[in-house]
Image: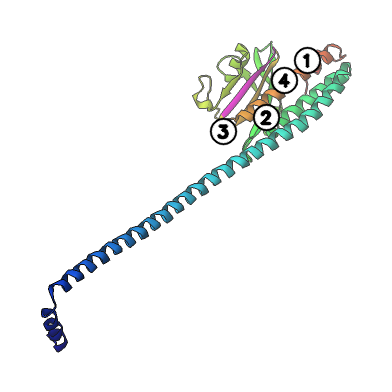
Amino acid sequence: MTALETIFLEAMDHFPDWVYAVAGIVFIAGSVVLMIQVTRISNKFANVVGREDRIGTLAETSAQLQSKLKTLEHVQTQYDSSLNEFSIFLEELRFIKESEGDEKFHLSVNLMKKLVNAVPGNMSATQGSNHRCALWMYNSTSEGLDFFTGSAQFPNDYKDGGRSLEINNTAGGRCFRKSESLYIDDVKYDDDWTANEQSKSHYNSLICIPILNWGIITVDAMSPFSQESRVIIQVYTDLLTLVIMEMYDGAVRSTFTQQQRWRV
């Protein structure tokens, strides 16, 4: 023990009792003050952490809202594009209605091809999605649905007239047979779907809509259709129905043979 420690201990022996009492009170008061300060600091830290959590939540919510905003902006662009083209097609239809005979027939067929080609580019709710659209005509001789015209996404063997759908055991045939629209998110789970080993496409979803007793329109997609796409497809189908009626009127008044009329 050092001399300084000895002197300090001897001094403590001569302290009166009240010194120790006061020292104890001071110690207790200091401990209370210290605890209060620690509590305040802890609360401030908790508030900061909570604020950071709230900021993180707000940032996540903001990101979600930004994503939804982009989707809505794309939907608006989608509708605007469709409406602009649709107005042009309506003007062409008006001109067709004023035509007669061969001219009406050929103008109608040409407009039908335009409409079919316009569908894939105007219906997608996801940018970069791949779709294709086709018209199938009922053939009373073979009792099947013959490929009439299709969008650019179809291979040439379709366009050369070498494709048809059976009335039975195909989704398109069921659509025509029962005269009901089909919205199939995954064709693998459809009772009438069978894999085409020769096909290299990766389309999984399908929409089929009947057109009077004439045939059907089909639209293929790689993912389920959005509600906006369904609406656009239905609008185009309604317009196609009007054009087909004009085509029939032109065919009836045409000088071509029946076989020549259906060569498109």
Counting from the top left corner in percent of width and height, residue 19 is at: 17, 73
Question: Image quarter for residue 70?
Answer: top right
Which badge, 2 or 3, is on the more N-terminal residue?
Answer: 2
Which badge, 2 or 4, is on the more N-terminal residue?
Answer: 2
Asked if residue 188 lies left or right of residue 145, the reply is left
In the picture of the structure, the residue carrying the numbered disc 1 is: 245
Q: Nearer the viewer, mark 2 or mark 3?
A: 3
Q: Is mark 1 on a helix, strand or loop?
A: helix
In the picture of the structure, the residue carrying the numbered disc 2 is: 157
* Magenta segment includes 128: no
Asked if residue 118 lies left or right of residue 92, the reply is left
Asked if residue 39 lies left or right of residue 208, the reply is left
Q: Is mark 4 on a helix, strand or loop?
A: helix
Structural distance between the alpha carbons of marks 2 and 1: 28 Å
Which badge, 3 or 4, is on the more N-terminal residue?
Answer: 3
In the picture of the structure, the residue carrying the numbered disc 4 is: 238
Circles 1 and 4: CB atoms closer than 8 Å: no
Figure check: 139 above or below 62: above
Number of marks in picture: 4
Structural distance between the alpha carbons of marks 1 and 4: 11 Å
Residue type, numbered disc 1 = Met
In the picture of the structure, the residue carrying the numbered disc 3 is: 223
| Highlighted magenta segment, given as a residue range | 205-212
